[in-house]
Protein backbone atom coordinates (compact mmCIF):
# COMPACT_ATOMS: atom_id res chain seq x y z
CA UNK A 1 0.00 0.00 0.00
CA UNK A 2 1.28 3.50 -0.78
CA UNK A 3 0.63 6.70 1.09
CA UNK A 4 -2.23 7.59 -1.23
CA UNK A 5 -4.43 5.04 0.50
CA UNK A 6 -3.72 6.65 3.89
CA UNK A 7 -4.55 10.20 2.83
CA UNK A 8 -8.34 9.70 2.81
CA UNK A 9 -8.19 8.79 6.49
CA UNK A 10 -6.47 12.05 7.35
CA UNK A 11 -9.00 13.95 5.28
CA UNK A 12 -11.79 12.31 7.28
CA UNK A 13 -9.98 13.07 10.55
CA UNK A 14 -9.40 16.70 9.66
CA UNK A 15 -13.02 17.11 8.60
CA UNK A 16 -14.21 15.45 11.80
CA UNK A 17 -12.01 17.71 13.92
CA UNK A 18 -13.69 20.82 12.52
CA UNK A 19 -17.22 20.82 11.17
CA UNK A 20 -18.12 17.25 12.12
CA UNK A 21 -16.46 16.87 15.51
CA UNK A 22 -19.86 17.09 17.19
CA UNK A 23 -21.31 14.34 14.97
CA UNK A 24 -18.97 11.31 15.06
CA UNK A 25 -16.60 9.80 17.61
CA UNK A 26 -15.00 6.95 15.67
CA UNK A 27 -12.36 5.73 18.12
CA UNK A 28 -10.86 6.01 21.58
CA UNK A 29 -9.72 9.62 22.15
CA UNK A 30 -12.00 10.95 19.43
CA UNK A 31 -11.91 11.91 15.75
CA UNK A 32 -8.25 12.92 15.69
CA UNK A 33 -7.04 10.38 18.26
CA UNK A 34 -5.71 13.01 20.66
CA UNK A 35 -8.55 13.49 23.19
CA UNK A 36 -9.67 16.80 21.66
CA UNK A 37 -13.33 17.39 20.76
CA UNK A 38 -14.84 20.25 18.82
CA UNK A 39 -16.60 23.26 20.28
CA UNK A 40 -20.11 22.73 21.60
CA UNK A 41 -22.58 23.49 24.37
CA UNK A 42 -21.76 20.36 26.36
CA UNK A 43 -23.35 19.63 29.77
CA UNK A 44 -21.51 20.66 32.92
CA UNK A 45 -23.88 19.75 35.77
CA UNK A 46 -25.52 16.34 35.88
CA UNK A 47 -25.96 13.17 37.93
CA UNK A 48 -27.60 9.76 37.67
CA UNK A 49 -30.97 11.54 37.92
CA UNK A 50 -30.22 15.05 36.62
CA UNK A 51 -29.64 15.98 32.98
CA UNK A 52 -30.03 12.36 31.85
CA UNK A 53 -31.71 12.05 28.45
CA UNK A 54 -31.61 8.28 28.78
CA UNK A 55 -29.61 5.50 30.38
CA UNK A 56 -29.26 2.07 28.84
CA UNK A 57 -28.67 -0.97 31.11
CA UNK A 58 -25.65 -2.86 29.76
CA UNK A 59 -25.64 -6.67 29.66
CA UNK A 60 -22.13 -7.03 31.13
CA UNK A 61 -18.85 -5.47 32.19
CA UNK A 62 -16.58 -3.44 29.96
CA UNK A 63 -14.18 -0.52 30.32
CA UNK A 64 -14.09 0.53 26.68
CA UNK A 65 -15.19 3.91 25.35
CA UNK A 66 -18.23 3.96 23.01
CA UNK A 67 -17.74 4.74 19.33
CA UNK A 68 -20.25 6.89 17.45
CA UNK A 69 -21.07 7.11 13.77
CA UNK A 70 -24.08 9.18 12.74
CA UNK A 71 -27.20 7.52 14.20
CA UNK A 72 -25.41 4.59 15.86
CA UNK A 73 -23.53 4.21 19.13
CA UNK A 74 -21.35 1.09 19.51
CA UNK A 75 -20.38 -0.45 22.86
CA UNK A 76 -18.39 -3.58 23.72
CA UNK A 77 -19.02 -5.59 26.88
CA UNK A 78 -19.40 -9.10 28.21
CA UNK A 79 -22.71 -10.75 27.30
CA UNK A 80 -23.51 -13.97 29.18
CA UNK A 81 -19.84 -14.94 29.42
CA UNK A 82 -19.12 -14.08 25.79
CA UNK A 83 -17.25 -11.23 24.11
CA UNK A 84 -20.07 -8.96 23.04
CA UNK A 85 -20.91 -5.80 21.13
CA UNK A 86 -24.14 -3.87 20.76
CA UNK A 87 -25.38 -0.89 18.79
CA UNK A 88 -28.00 1.55 20.02
CA UNK A 89 -29.59 4.69 18.60
CA UNK A 90 -29.86 8.21 20.02
CA UNK A 91 -32.98 7.26 21.95
CA UNK A 92 -31.08 4.56 23.84
CA UNK A 93 -32.81 1.75 21.96
CA UNK A 94 -30.70 -1.34 21.16
CA UNK A 95 -30.57 -1.89 17.40
CA UNK A 96 -28.55 -5.09 17.46
CA UNK A 97 -26.43 -7.20 19.82
CA UNK A 98 -23.85 -9.89 18.94
CA UNK A 99 -21.49 -12.30 20.72
CA UNK A 100 -18.17 -13.68 19.46
CA UNK A 101 -17.04 -16.51 21.74
CA UNK A 102 -15.83 -17.02 25.31
CA UNK A 103 -14.83 -13.91 27.26
CA UNK A 104 -11.60 -13.63 29.27
CA UNK A 105 -12.73 -11.63 32.31
CA UNK A 106 -10.66 -8.82 33.79
CA UNK A 107 -8.20 -9.22 36.66
CA UNK A 108 -8.15 -5.64 37.92
CA UNK A 109 -11.18 -4.17 39.68
CA UNK A 110 -11.42 -1.59 36.90
CA UNK A 111 -10.55 -4.03 34.15
CA UNK A 112 -12.62 -6.31 31.94
CA UNK A 113 -12.44 -8.53 28.92
CA UNK A 114 -13.68 -5.54 26.90
CA UNK A 115 -11.11 -2.83 27.61
CA UNK A 116 -10.19 -2.00 23.97
CA UNK A 117 -12.56 0.51 22.41
CA UNK A 118 -14.45 -0.22 19.19
CA UNK A 119 -13.49 1.76 16.08
CA UNK A 120 -15.43 2.65 12.96
CA UNK A 121 -14.77 4.29 9.61
CA UNK A 122 -18.43 4.72 8.76
CA UNK A 123 -18.46 1.50 6.72
CA UNK A 124 -17.73 -1.07 9.41
CA UNK A 125 -17.19 -1.31 13.15
CA UNK A 126 -14.18 -3.26 14.43
CA UNK A 127 -14.00 -4.78 17.92
CA UNK A 128 -11.11 -6.31 19.88
CA UNK A 129 -11.00 -8.14 23.21
CA UNK A 130 -8.69 -9.49 25.91
CA UNK A 131 -9.39 -12.97 24.52
CA UNK A 132 -7.51 -11.97 21.35
CA UNK A 133 -10.70 -12.02 19.30
CA UNK A 134 -11.04 -9.30 16.68
CA UNK A 135 -14.03 -8.92 14.38
CA UNK A 136 -15.57 -6.60 11.84
CA UNK A 137 -19.31 -5.92 11.52
CA UNK A 138 -21.33 -3.86 9.13
CA UNK A 139 -23.03 -0.90 10.81
CA UNK A 140 -26.22 -2.97 10.62
CA UNK A 141 -24.65 -5.79 12.66
CA UNK A 142 -23.74 -8.35 9.97
CA UNK A 143 -20.44 -10.12 10.63
CA UNK A 144 -17.82 -9.39 7.96
CA UNK A 145 -15.00 -11.46 9.44
CA UNK A 146 -13.59 -12.73 12.73
CA UNK A 147 -10.08 -13.76 13.80
CA UNK A 148 -8.00 -14.22 16.96
CA UNK A 149 -4.60 -12.58 17.25
CA UNK A 150 -3.46 -14.82 20.10
CA UNK A 151 -4.24 -17.95 18.12
CA UNK A 152 -2.45 -16.51 15.09
CA UNK A 153 0.61 -14.98 16.74
CA UNK A 154 1.01 -16.34 20.27
CA UNK A 155 -0.47 -16.10 23.74
CA UNK A 156 -1.08 -12.90 25.67
CA UNK A 157 1.75 -12.46 28.21
CA UNK A 158 0.53 -9.20 29.78
CA UNK A 159 0.28 -9.37 33.57
CA UNK A 160 -2.92 -7.31 33.58
CA UNK A 161 -5.88 -6.73 31.30
CA UNK A 162 -5.18 -6.00 27.65
CA UNK A 163 -6.05 -2.37 27.06
CA UNK A 164 -4.70 -1.15 23.74
CA UNK A 165 -7.30 -0.21 21.14
CA UNK A 166 -6.97 -0.78 17.38
CA UNK A 167 -6.70 2.14 14.95
CA UNK A 168 -7.51 2.54 11.27
CA UNK A 169 -4.68 3.37 8.88
CA UNK A 170 -6.32 3.80 5.52
CA UNK A 171 -7.81 0.45 4.50
CA UNK A 172 -5.96 -1.37 7.27
CA UNK A 173 -6.43 -1.93 11.00
CA UNK A 174 -3.37 -1.64 13.20
CA UNK A 175 -2.86 -3.22 16.62
CA UNK A 176 0.22 -2.89 18.84
CA UNK A 177 0.82 -5.95 21.02
CA UNK A 178 3.52 -4.97 23.52
CA UNK A 179 3.99 -7.57 26.21
CA UNK A 180 6.51 -9.76 28.00
CA UNK A 181 9.21 -10.81 25.52
CA UNK A 182 7.78 -11.17 21.97
CA UNK A 183 6.04 -7.89 21.02
CA UNK A 184 4.82 -6.81 17.61
CA UNK A 185 2.75 -4.37 15.59
CA UNK A 186 0.39 -5.88 13.03
CA UNK A 187 -1.84 -4.48 10.29
CA UNK A 188 -4.86 -6.42 9.04
CA UNK A 189 -6.67 -5.71 5.82
CA UNK A 190 -10.00 -4.16 6.77
CA UNK A 191 -11.78 -6.00 3.96
CA UNK A 192 -11.18 -9.54 5.20
CA UNK A 193 -8.91 -9.54 8.29
CA UNK A 194 -5.95 -11.00 6.42
CA UNK A 195 -2.45 -9.90 7.40
CA UNK A 196 -1.10 -6.90 5.50
CA UNK A 197 2.14 -6.70 7.48
CA UNK A 198 3.59 -7.61 10.87
CA UNK A 199 6.80 -6.23 12.40
CA UNK A 200 8.70 -7.15 15.53
CA UNK A 201 8.80 -4.51 18.28
CA UNK A 202 10.73 -6.31 20.99
CA UNK A 203 13.31 -4.32 22.98
CA UNK A 204 15.76 -5.77 25.54
CA UNK A 205 14.17 -4.56 28.80
CA UNK A 206 13.75 -5.83 32.33
CA UNK A 207 10.78 -7.78 33.71
CA UNK A 208 7.38 -6.15 33.01
CA UNK A 209 8.98 -3.04 31.47
CA UNK A 210 8.17 -4.27 27.97
CA UNK A 211 4.46 -4.44 28.76
CA UNK A 212 2.38 -1.57 27.43
CA UNK A 213 -1.34 -0.76 27.45
CA UNK A 214 -1.11 2.23 25.10
CA UNK A 215 -2.76 2.81 21.71
CA UNK A 216 -0.98 3.80 18.45
CA UNK A 217 -1.52 7.27 17.01
CA UNK A 218 -1.73 8.01 13.28
CA UNK A 219 -0.52 11.45 12.27
CA UNK A 220 1.46 13.33 9.63
CA UNK A 221 5.04 14.26 10.54
CA UNK A 222 7.26 16.20 8.15
CA UNK A 223 4.81 15.45 5.35
CA UNK A 224 4.97 11.71 6.01
CA UNK A 225 2.19 9.50 7.37
CA UNK A 226 3.42 8.00 10.63
CA UNK A 227 2.13 5.53 13.22
CA UNK A 228 3.49 6.52 16.62
CA UNK A 229 3.83 3.71 19.17
CA UNK A 230 4.82 4.05 22.84
CA UNK A 231 6.07 1.24 25.08
CA UNK A 232 9.11 -0.74 26.27
CA UNK A 233 11.03 2.47 27.08
CA UNK A 234 10.84 3.58 23.43
CA UNK A 235 8.74 5.93 21.32
CA UNK A 236 8.81 4.76 17.72
CA UNK A 237 7.48 6.00 14.39
CA UNK A 238 6.39 3.49 11.75
CA UNK A 239 5.48 3.62 8.08
CA UNK A 240 1.78 2.62 7.96
CA UNK A 241 2.30 1.17 4.48
CA UNK A 242 4.81 -1.46 5.62
CA UNK A 243 5.27 -1.20 9.40
CA UNK A 244 8.93 -0.32 8.90
CA UNK A 245 10.49 1.70 11.72
CA UNK A 246 11.15 5.28 10.60
CA UNK A 247 12.66 6.55 13.83
CA UNK A 248 13.26 5.48 17.42
CA UNK A 249 13.57 7.57 20.57
CA UNK A 250 14.85 5.94 23.76
CA UNK A 251 16.43 7.17 26.96
CA UNK A 252 13.28 6.81 29.06
CA UNK A 253 14.80 4.30 31.48
CA UNK A 254 18.55 4.98 31.72
CA UNK A 255 18.94 2.79 34.82
CA UNK A 256 17.17 -0.11 33.08
CA UNK A 257 14.66 -0.58 35.87
CA UNK A 258 12.13 -3.43 35.95
CA UNK A 259 8.38 -2.98 36.42
CA UNK A 260 8.22 0.21 34.31
CA UNK A 261 5.23 -0.88 32.22
CA UNK A 262 3.25 2.02 30.75
CA UNK A 263 -0.50 2.59 30.65
CA UNK A 264 -0.98 6.23 29.62
CA UNK A 265 -0.56 7.06 25.94
CA UNK A 266 1.33 10.27 25.05
CA UNK A 267 -0.29 13.65 24.55
CA UNK A 268 0.29 15.27 21.16
CA UNK A 269 0.48 18.84 19.91
CA UNK A 270 2.52 20.71 17.29
CA UNK A 271 4.51 17.61 16.34
CA UNK A 272 5.52 17.00 19.95
CA UNK A 273 4.74 13.89 22.00
CA UNK A 274 4.51 14.45 25.75
CA UNK A 275 5.21 11.09 27.38
CA UNK A 276 4.48 10.11 31.00
CA UNK A 277 6.47 7.15 32.31
CA UNK A 278 8.23 5.67 35.31
CA UNK A 279 4.99 4.94 37.18
CA UNK A 280 4.03 8.61 37.80
CA UNK A 281 7.60 9.77 38.45
CA UNK A 282 8.58 11.26 35.07
CA UNK A 283 7.27 13.08 32.03
CA UNK A 284 9.28 14.03 28.92
CA UNK A 285 8.74 15.56 25.49
CA UNK A 286 9.93 14.36 22.09
CA UNK A 287 9.98 16.27 18.81
CA UNK A 288 8.68 13.57 16.49
CA UNK A 289 10.22 12.95 13.08
CA UNK A 290 13.58 12.39 11.47
CA UNK A 291 15.10 8.98 10.85
CA UNK A 292 17.03 6.36 12.74
CA UNK A 293 17.89 6.81 16.41
CA UNK A 294 16.69 10.32 17.32
CA UNK A 295 17.18 9.97 21.10
CA UNK A 296 19.84 12.69 21.40
CA UNK A 297 18.38 15.13 18.90
CA UNK A 298 14.66 14.84 19.65
CA UNK A 299 14.40 14.90 23.44
CA UNK A 300 13.18 18.41 24.29
CA UNK A 301 12.87 18.22 28.07
CA UNK A 302 12.27 15.93 31.01
CA UNK A 303 10.71 16.52 34.42
CA UNK A 304 11.06 14.33 37.50
CA UNK A 305 8.46 14.08 40.24
CA UNK A 306 5.57 14.72 37.86
CA UNK A 307 3.53 12.30 35.82
CA UNK A 308 0.46 10.12 35.39
CA UNK A 309 0.13 6.37 35.41
CA UNK A 310 -3.29 5.85 33.78
CA UNK A 311 -4.76 9.11 32.36
CA UNK A 312 -3.26 10.14 29.01
CA UNK A 313 -2.27 13.82 28.63
CA UNK A 314 -4.23 16.10 26.28
CA UNK A 315 -2.39 18.45 23.94
CA UNK A 316 -3.74 21.43 21.98
CA UNK A 317 -2.30 24.67 20.54
CA UNK A 318 1.17 24.04 21.91
CA UNK A 319 -0.05 23.33 25.44
CA UNK A 320 -0.50 20.02 27.20
CA UNK A 321 -2.78 19.22 30.13
CA UNK A 322 -1.44 16.49 32.39
CA UNK A 323 -3.99 14.97 34.79
CA UNK A 324 -2.41 12.85 37.51
CA UNK A 325 -4.08 9.79 38.97
CA UNK A 326 -4.83 11.88 42.07
CA UNK A 327 -6.41 14.86 40.32
CA UNK A 328 -3.53 17.32 39.98
CA UNK A 329 -3.53 19.18 36.66
CA UNK A 330 -0.43 20.77 35.14
CA UNK A 331 -0.84 22.96 32.07
CA UNK A 332 2.57 23.00 30.40
CA UNK A 333 4.23 24.55 27.40
CA UNK A 334 4.83 21.47 25.26
CA UNK A 335 8.07 22.76 23.78
CA UNK A 336 9.75 23.74 27.06
CA UNK A 337 7.98 21.76 29.80
CA UNK A 338 7.42 24.96 31.77
CA UNK A 339 4.27 25.11 33.84
CA UNK A 340 1.81 27.72 32.64
CA UNK A 341 -0.19 26.87 35.73
CA UNK A 342 -0.73 24.08 38.25
CA UNK A 343 -3.89 23.32 40.21
CA UNK A 344 -5.93 20.36 41.39
CA UNK A 345 -9.44 18.98 41.47
CA UNK A 346 -10.56 18.62 45.12
CA UNK A 347 -9.08 15.41 46.46
CA UNK A 348 -10.84 12.13 47.14
CA UNK A 349 -9.75 8.61 48.02
CA UNK A 350 -10.49 7.31 44.50
CA UNK A 351 -8.20 7.69 41.48
CA UNK A 352 -8.58 8.90 37.91
CA UNK A 353 -8.21 5.93 35.56
CA UNK A 354 -9.90 7.19 32.40
CA UNK A 355 -8.15 9.64 30.09
CA UNK A 356 -9.52 13.20 30.17
CA UNK A 357 -11.19 14.75 27.12
CA UNK A 358 -10.90 18.44 26.16
CA UNK A 359 -14.06 19.89 24.57
CA UNK A 360 -13.67 23.59 23.86
CA UNK A 361 -12.50 25.02 27.19
CA UNK A 362 -13.97 22.14 29.23
CA UNK A 363 -11.78 19.31 30.48
CA UNK A 364 -13.84 16.24 31.45
CA UNK A 365 -12.09 14.14 34.10
CA UNK A 366 -13.64 10.81 35.13
CA UNK A 367 -12.85 9.29 38.54
CA UNK A 368 -13.18 5.57 39.19
CA UNK A 369 -15.81 6.05 41.94
CA UNK A 370 -18.25 7.56 39.43
CA UNK A 371 -17.54 11.27 39.88
CA UNK A 372 -17.02 13.35 36.74
CA UNK A 373 -15.21 16.65 37.30
CA UNK A 374 -15.89 19.34 34.70
CA UNK A 375 -12.97 21.76 34.68
CA UNK A 376 -12.91 25.02 32.75
CA UNK A 377 -9.38 25.74 31.53
CA UNK A 378 -7.76 28.88 30.17
CA UNK A 379 -4.25 30.22 29.64
CA UNK A 380 -4.27 31.63 33.15
CA UNK A 381 -5.69 28.75 35.18
CA UNK A 382 -8.61 26.42 35.84
CA UNK A 383 -11.94 26.41 37.61
CA UNK A 384 -13.72 23.25 38.73
CA UNK A 385 -17.26 23.94 37.58
CA UNK A 386 -18.83 20.78 38.98
CA UNK A 387 -18.17 17.35 40.43
CA UNK A 388 -20.97 15.15 39.20
CA UNK A 389 -21.67 11.86 40.97
CA UNK A 390 -23.13 9.22 38.63
CA UNK A 391 -23.59 6.65 41.38
CA UNK A 392 -21.69 3.80 39.74
CA UNK A 393 -18.11 2.97 38.86
CA UNK A 394 -16.78 4.73 35.75
CA UNK A 395 -13.57 3.83 33.93
CA UNK A 396 -14.22 4.58 30.24
CA UNK A 397 -13.22 7.92 28.74
CA UNK A 398 -16.16 10.33 28.25
CA UNK A 399 -17.52 11.11 24.78
CA UNK A 400 -18.63 14.73 24.12
CA UNK A 401 -20.54 14.54 20.84
CA UNK A 402 -23.57 16.34 19.32
CA UNK A 403 -23.56 18.68 22.35
CA UNK A 404 -24.28 15.64 24.51
CA UNK A 405 -22.05 13.60 26.77
CA UNK A 406 -21.90 9.79 26.67
CA UNK A 407 -20.66 8.14 29.85
CA UNK A 408 -20.03 4.44 30.08
CA UNK A 409 -20.47 3.04 33.59
CA UNK A 410 -20.12 -0.42 35.07
CA UNK A 411 -23.87 -0.95 34.66
CA UNK A 412 -25.24 1.68 32.26
CA UNK A 413 -24.53 3.80 29.22
CA UNK A 414 -25.65 7.37 29.97
CA UNK A 415 -26.58 10.07 27.48
CA UNK A 416 -26.48 13.49 29.14
CA UNK A 417 -27.54 16.87 27.82
CA UNK A 418 -30.43 19.24 27.30
CA UNK A 419 -33.70 17.79 25.95
Image (cartoon, helix red, strand yellow):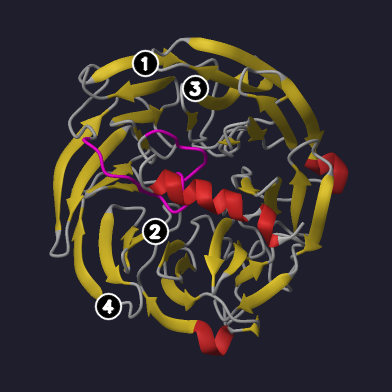
Q: Earlier in the sequence, mark 2 or mark 1?
A: 1
Q: Nearer the viewer, residue 18 or 334?
A: 18
Residue tagged by mark 4? 338
Secondary structure type for disc 1: strand
User: Which quadrant of the rendered structure holds the C terminus?
Assistant: top left
- Residue 194: which numbered mark, if any? none
For the residues labelled 1 and 4, the Cα–Cα distance comes to 42 Å
Q: Is the residue under label 3 in contact with that under label 4 (CB below 8 Å)?
A: no
In the displayed structure, would residue 259 be above or below residue 100?
below
Quadrant of the image occupied by residue 78: top right
User: With 219 as the anchor, is 146 left or right in this view?
Assistant: right
Residue tagged by mark 1? 55
For the residues labelled 4 and 2, the Cα–Cα distance comes to 15 Å
User: With 417 as the anchor, is 105 left or right in this view?
Assistant: right
Secondary structure type for disc 4: loop
Q: Earlier in the sequence, mark 1 or mark 4?
A: 1
Residue drawn at point x = 68 percent, y = 25 percent: 137
Residue drawn at point x = 35 percent, y = 69 percent: 306
Secondary structure type for disc 2: loop
- Residue 313: which numbered mark, if any? 2
Residue drawn at point x = 68 percent, y = 50 percent: 174
Residue tagged by mark 3? 72
For the residues labelled 4 and 3, the Cα–Cα distance comes to 42 Å
Q: Nearer the viewer, residue 92 or 129?
A: 92
For the residues labelled 2 and 1, the Cα–Cα distance comes to 29 Å
Quadrant of the image occupied by residue 151: top right
Q: What range of the chain is rendered magenta?
A: 23-41
For the residues labelled 1 and 3, the Cα–Cα distance comes to 15 Å
Amino acid sequence: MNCASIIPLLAISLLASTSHAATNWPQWRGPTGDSVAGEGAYPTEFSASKGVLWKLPLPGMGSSTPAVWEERIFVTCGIEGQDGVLACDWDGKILWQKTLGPERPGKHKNGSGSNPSPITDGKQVVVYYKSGTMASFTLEGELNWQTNLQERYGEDTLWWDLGTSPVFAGDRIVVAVMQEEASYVVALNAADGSEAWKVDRTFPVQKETGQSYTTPYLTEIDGKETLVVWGADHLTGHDPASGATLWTCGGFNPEDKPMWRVIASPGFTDGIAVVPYGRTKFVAAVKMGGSGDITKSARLWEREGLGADCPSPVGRDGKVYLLSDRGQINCMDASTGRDLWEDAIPRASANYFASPILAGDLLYCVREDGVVAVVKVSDSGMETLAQNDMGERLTGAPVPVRERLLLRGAEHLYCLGKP
